[in-house]
Image (tube, coloured by chain):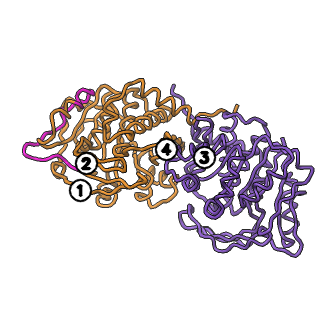
Chain colours: A purple, B orange
Amino acid sequence: MSLLTIGSVAFDALETPFGKTDKIIGGAATYITLSASYFTEENNLVAVVGDDFPQSMIDDLNRHGVDTEGLAVRKGEKTFFWSGKYHNDMNTRDTVEVQLNVMEHFDPVIPDSYQDCQYLMLGNTAPAIQRTVIGRLHNRPKLIVLDTMNLWIDIARPDLMTLIPMVDILVVNDEEARQLTGQYALVTAAAKIREMGPKTVIIKKGEHGALLFHEGQIFFAPALPLAEVFDPTGAGDTFAGGFIGHLAKTDDVSFENMKRAIIYGSAMASFCVEQFGAERIMNLTQNEIQARVSEFVKLSAFGLG
Amino acid sequence: MSLLTIGSVAFDALETPFGKTDKIIGGAATYITLSASYFTEENNLVAVVGDDFPQSMIDDLNRHGVDTEGLAVRKGEKTFFWSGKYHNDMNTRDTVEVQLNVMEHFDPVIPDSYQDCQYLMLGNTAPAIQRTVIGRLHNRPKLIVLDTMNLWIDIARPDLMTLIPMVDILVVNDEEARQLTGQYALVTAAAKIREMGPKTVIIKKGEHGALLFHEGQIFFAPALPLAEVFDPTGAGDTFAGGFIGHLAKTDDVSFENMKRAIIYGSAMASFCVEQFGAERIMNLTQNEIQARVSEFVKLSAFGLG
């Protein structure tokens, strides 16, 4: 089934203990659509860039089957830019610079050809923009997944609180779940979020895996223990892309299939951190993905015998 | 097969955000033997207490099938005492007071009837004492499991470094693994520890589960997501007791059976935190344990179907 993703397409400049990059392609929607491209064929993108954004990068997205009709290119304006520096533990980072540029007045226009989308991924951006996208779809998609971040919980909580009841699944990390609900225990935080509306909550715990809460059931997905995390940028978006990509491909939103989707998302995220930016998930094969998924199966399988 | 456990039997006074206790029974060996008692019938304890230690508490251990012939009661001396206060997040705690008392000169005497033990659990205490126990056994047990803590890595590293090569399995938490090896990534830390001698390494991550590293294979065991952790004291020891208790009961040290043992250990630990001290693991039924283990199975099971 067709997937529509909205969110940022951006330039990032990254510094980790392993090195630094110049401006490379980044942005939530970039990671999501690239990751989803390994699963679903109808992969539509709504985002905005400036005319400084190279056609070669748009070509890269197209080569992965991402439809960029909904990628607005604003003449005379500049692409959203973020630069960040990771601390030695790789779990925390400082934002060095943000230039909103085209994102400041992002008005998401949905091409007619995208109107039939059944799966909607609201990648991280301002909640008001995410809500506008829902409003501009003639029919409600079968499944709406929302990603957000601490920034919006801080500065746009009222917008977020009107948006959350409109979605089926909220994806946040552990700290965001706590910040959103004021609850320390993740079980309690997830229950509070489910009271706000979403039937399903996914709490990402980075190197500690992810929790899926769905109608009173819980699934705990492991993360692959890695000897080296080269660059965590985009891992959460890549996870979300693999998750919704698998759901869109199979068109099955049962709890059992969501578990599988989380394993696929986790596998994709484990690739993402191996190289800078989106480099690794630009260049994956289906065989590599299947082999990585098998590692997840081995990692957490046990029989009571 | 018979299990021998050494470690502290103590008084604890605990304070958590949920309340505080007077002196209650505590100590690593107490939690280990109580937890193991639900699995194995030959459950032998070597420890020392003062004559202030109530007979009723020894009776409690005996009622759980713990053989206390090796529990020395020192006349005119006082039992080891620890008091601690947990912070609001329950993941960190301050030691309020430590009275070593009888532990200062703990000389572990192994009763003849314990000499045939096949499974040895070296519960947390000074590495020199743990090593003495190995030296005083006429035959090397089939499996030796070592637990230690940050204190000994700090103040008794040389002793610890001569002990580690003598054991089959080292059990530590994530911070201890990092402190011991200087490696941040747990995969790398586990590899370094395996280079020191132990074939198997278990890294406990508290609410994030546990990792089992065994001859190049990895198993990731989930922790049960709990709405409320009432008191984490003894959870790690309870985990170790369930782990080695299951191995001793089944007399099978294969990787597959160690995975099961970790699930049993995790289930036992999830009970431990529900009440103060050892209260909950004093009063469990086999049905409760089986039901809890089933929750672990449900929590992490998925099929790629």
Read off the residue under disc 3.
Answer: A193
Chain of the residue on which disc 4 is drawn = B
The reply to whether the C-beta atoms of the residues labelled 1 and 2 are less than 8 Å apart is yes
Residue A53 in sight from this viewpoint: yes
Residue B13's label in the rendered image is: 2
Q: Name the quadrant containing residue A41.
A: top right
Query: Could you tell which of marks 4 and 1 lies nearer the N-terminus?
Result: 1
Q: Is residue A47 left or right of residue A305?
A: right
Query: Could you tell which of marks 2 and 4 lies nearer the N-terminus?
Result: 2
- B157 relative to A22, above or below: above
Q: Name the quadrant containing residue B262.
A: top left
User: Circle 4 — which element?
Assistant: loop
Q: Is residue A215 left or right of residue A129?
A: left
Chain of the residue on which disc 3 is drawn = A
Label 4, label 1: how far apart the Cα atoms are: 29 Å
Mark nearest the camera among 2 and 4 is 2
Residue span colored magenta: B60-81
Q: Quadrant of the N terminus of chain B?
A: top left
- In the image, what residue occupies the spot 57% across and 45% down? A190
- Dot 2: few (<14), some (14–19), or many (≥20) neighbours within 10 Å? many
User: Circle 1 — which element?
Assistant: strand
Residue B97's label in the rendered image is: 1
In the rendered structure, which amino acid carries the disc numbered 3? Ile
Read off the residue under disc 4.
Answer: B209
